[in-house]
Amino acid sequence: MVFLYDENAGNEFLQINDFKHLKARRVGVGERIDIRNLKDNYNYIYEITEISKKQMSLELIFKHTLPNDELFLSLAWAVIDPAVIEKTLPTLNEMGVKKIFFIYTDFSQKNFKLDTQRFKRILINSSQQCGRNSIMEFEIYKSFDEFLGKFSDVVLVDFEGVKEANFSKDKIYFIGPEGGFSDDERQKVKEKVLLNSPFILKSNSAIIGVASKILL
């Protein structure tokens, strides 16, 4: 773990109740730990002043400025099984994806509900592990048309697309659900690309593939 998240980081004193992960590191009174709030560009150094069974008390010693994360990539992803999304979020966050647009498409199961608070907890844990001083943002759209009504630079990642050697960071690549896009959806977006793989990729594999081509 690179740092510990606490929304109140920056206050002169902190009280932490959930610190099992710190217990595993066998930290003691007098030791210093890095804490961030993921809202500003500071890393706060706190010293542990007291440890009880249920609570840890800390005092701010100093802070230092962190460089801005140079994040630019936004991707669109059709809603699929939330369990699969949750397993994929840490990878996309660690790679440096700035934002994910989740869209309910024709082949998305409408009974799938996205737990945004759970997503946030997963992303915070990911950032603590990888050192990212932010978490990946996300927005949810109820339909394909609602999303297209807001964005015009959309490219479908589709079975019927053409193989693309160079993916542009200035476009929003839209990864479909299992089964791809409906014919009606394909007709609404002119530009379509295909990943250079001889096999059919699962939706979560495809979005990682697109992110990799642009970011890594």
Image: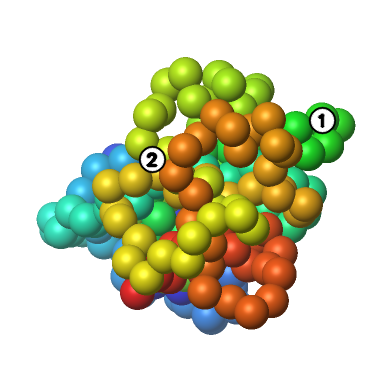
Q: CA distance from mark 1 to mark 2?
A: 37 Å
User: Does the rendering let one see residue 73?
Assistant: yes
SS assignment at label 1: loop
Q: Position of residue 190 (x, y in %)?
A: 47, 38
Q: Look at 71% across and 69% down and name the residue there.
A: 200
* Residues at circles 1 and 2 in contact by the CB criterion of under 8 Å: no
In the rendered structure, which disc, 1 or 2, sits on the residue that comes first in sequence?
2
150 left or right of 40 in image: right
Which residue position is annotated with label 2?
Answer: 8
Q: Position of residue 87 (x, y in %)?
A: 68, 62
Residue 113 is drawn in which quadrant?
A: top right
Which residue position is annotated with label 1?
Answer: 110
Residue 160 is drawn in which quadrant?
A: bottom right
Quarter of the image where the C terminus is located: bottom left
SS assignment at label 2: loop
Q: Amino acid at mark 2?
A: Asn
Given residues 14 and 87, the one toward you in this image is 87
Q: Position of residue 94 (x, y in %)?
A: 44, 66
Given residues 134 and 169, the one toward you in this image is 169
